[in-house]
């Protein structure tokens, strides 16, 4: 039975880079009908914050991920917050000390730093020199009775540590170069390595799927698994996602946190799809897919060893595709809060003219990739457009005036304008004025919206209604009728 976990440290907002790790763990569990576990690694008391835990749970749910065990849903091997498991780490640490697998180290941070410096200067690796491993009984007693602070270090055996990574193949590390590492800090919280190995053991994790940045930590974890008499899980270290400048993805590259994407009104299925394209692609190479299309063929071993590059343009393109295919009712519901916040609608939920909003959505959905863009795109339907000086001049030209005047006259006949009638009307104006193409459409578009681009003319006229169209045109007619 496959058991995998996503184990974030709640020290910031969930980012595309780490959410991607959650996604591949979740996919793998789904693929093998296994269990997906959420474990919060919050033993760094200074940097961990409760609000990040709440937020990341909300963000993962928004993406459509669900887990069978976790802090919010419980489970057989909980608690799932490491800060609530301190007694477990302490008990195992005591056991390690008793069995001679670990020992108290009384070296102070200052002494350690001084030794690291001098090792560096003499060209030696700056690792711990294991000096407290061999303290005499008298030394131990003296330090203890003096009440000195201590950490607990794991006795690293002199051996080669080898494992088969599902993505990277055979990896080998020489543990004799490692130095004894800390498993328990002086404040009695476990080190990252210790908490991970203990929890992966207790939670019966079968596959550890995480970022390549943890590859160098894996030998420490394997040594701890051995000490715990536990067969190590299978490892799969995923390549990381970079910005276009090939440095680790961050805000600087225009990549937002998941909650920011959500606030901007990206659709979750678009973000999820895009994250799966980072370092992986389906066999048919299609870029747009949902889980059901790929779940039967997903293999971790197909994941790329090379790092992926985050491409906001591509994400926007994909997101645009999802918006175009989305149900208008859903988009309208998502759009209302943005329109309200921008002051474009101010009515209570029951008084909102949803029909009109749906018409607007249909008119503009091919021009947007996230819902918040509706505010800018839909502005033209809610208030008289502000027309720039350049456009006023353009509309005052002889050509524009003949188009506007002819259009205005023809509008008198209609209460509304069907697609067909708009076509007929434009052809009639063309015959009358001998103006065609862009010079025919543009004055009408600019007079109605103050912009050179936007939804189709038909949609604009249909949504605004004939009366408003007439009024907007009249503003620019120099020879009033
Ligand atoms: N807490 C670690 C992190 O956020 C994950 C450790 C692991 O997956 O083993 O990077």
Image (cartoon, rainbow, N blue to C red):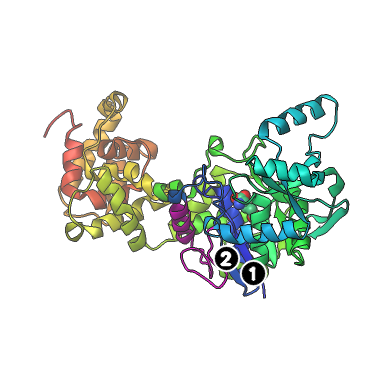
Location of the C terminus (image quadrant): top left
The percent position of residue 237, horizontal first and vertical second, equals 72, 54
Q: Residues within 10 Å of mark 2 (few under 14, many from 20)?
A: many
For the residue pair 147 and 375, the one nearer the viewer reads as: 147
Which disc number belongs to residue 112? none
Q: Residue at x 16, y 51 (%)?
A: 413
**Residue 397 relative to residue 174: left or right:** left
Q: Is residue 227 magenta?
A: no
For the residue pair 91 and 373, the one nearer the viewer reads as: 91
Question: Sequence order check: which comes first, mark 2 or mark 1?
Answer: 1
Magenta residues span: 53-81
The percent position of residue 241, horizontal first and vertical second, equals 64, 46
- The residue where tag 1 is placed is 3
Q: Which residue is drawn at 26% across and 27% down?
A: 392
Q: Does the magenta stretch include residue 76?
A: yes
- The residue where tag 2 is placed is 37
Is residue 438 at least partly visible in the picture? yes
Whether label 1 lies within 8 Å of ligand 1 gets the answer no
Farthest residue to the left: give it. Answer: 481
Q: Residue at x 77, y 67 (%)?
A: 231
């Amino acid at each position: 039975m496959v058991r995998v976990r996503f184990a974030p440290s709640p020290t910031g907002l969930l980012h595309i880079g780490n959410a991607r790790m959650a996604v591949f763990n979740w996919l793998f569990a789904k693929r093998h009908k296994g269990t997906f576990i959420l474990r919060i690694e919050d033993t760094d008391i200074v940097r961990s914050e409760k609000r990040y835990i709440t937020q990341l749970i909300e963000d993962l749910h928004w993406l459509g991920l669900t887990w069978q065990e976790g802090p919010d849903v419980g489970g057989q091997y909980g608690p799932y917050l490491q800060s609530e498991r301190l007694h477990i780490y302490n008990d195992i640490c005591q056991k390690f000390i008793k069995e001679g697998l670990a020992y108290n180290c009384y070296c102070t941070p200052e002494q350690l730093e001084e030794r690291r410096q001098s090792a560096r200067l003499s060209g030696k690796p700056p690792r711990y020199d294991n000096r407290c491993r061999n303290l005499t009984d008298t030394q131990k007693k003296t330090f203890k009775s003096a009440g000195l602070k201590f950490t607990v270090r794991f006795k690293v055996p002199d051996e080669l540590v080898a494992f088969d990574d599902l993505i990277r193949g055979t990896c080998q590390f020489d543990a004799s170069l490692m130095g004894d590492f800390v498993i328990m800090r002086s404040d009695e919280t476990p080190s990252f390595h210790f908490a991970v190995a203990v929890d992966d053991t207790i939670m019966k994790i079968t596959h550890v799927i995480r970022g390549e940045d943890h590859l160098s930590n894996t030998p420490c974890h394997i040594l701890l698994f051995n000490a715990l008499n536990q067969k190590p899980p299978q490892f799969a270290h995923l390549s990381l996602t970079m910005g276009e400048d090939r440095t680790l993805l961050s805000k600087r590259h225009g990549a937002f946190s998941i909650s920011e994407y959500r606030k901007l009104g990206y659709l979750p299925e678009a973000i999820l799809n895009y994250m799966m394209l980072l370092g992986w692609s389906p066999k048919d190479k299609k870029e747009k897919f949902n889980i059901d299309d790929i779940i039967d063929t997903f293999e971790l071993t197909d994941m790329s060893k090379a790092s992926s590059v985050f491409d906001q343009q591509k994400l926007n393109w994909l997101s645009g595709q999802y918006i175009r295919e989305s149900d208008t009712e859903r988009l309208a519901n998502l759009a209302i809060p943005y329109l309200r916040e921008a002051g474009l609608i101010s009515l209570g939920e029951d008084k909102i003219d949803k029909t009109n909003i749906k018409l607007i959505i249909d008119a503009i959905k091919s021009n947007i990739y996230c819902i918040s863009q509706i505010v800018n795109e839909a502005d033209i339907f809610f208030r008289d457009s502000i027309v720039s000086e350049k456009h006023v001049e353009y509309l005052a030209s002889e050509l524009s005036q003949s188009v506007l005047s002819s259009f205005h006259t023809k509008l008198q006949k209609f209460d509304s304008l069907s697609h067909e009638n708009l076509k007929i009307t434009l052809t009639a104006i063309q015959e009358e004025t001998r103006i065609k193409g862009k010079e025919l459409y543009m004055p009408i578009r600019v007079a109605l919206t103050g912009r050179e681009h936007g939804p189709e003319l038909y949609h604009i006229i249909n949504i605004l209604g004939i009366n408003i169209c007439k009024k907007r045109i009249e503003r620019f007619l120099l020879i009033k009728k």
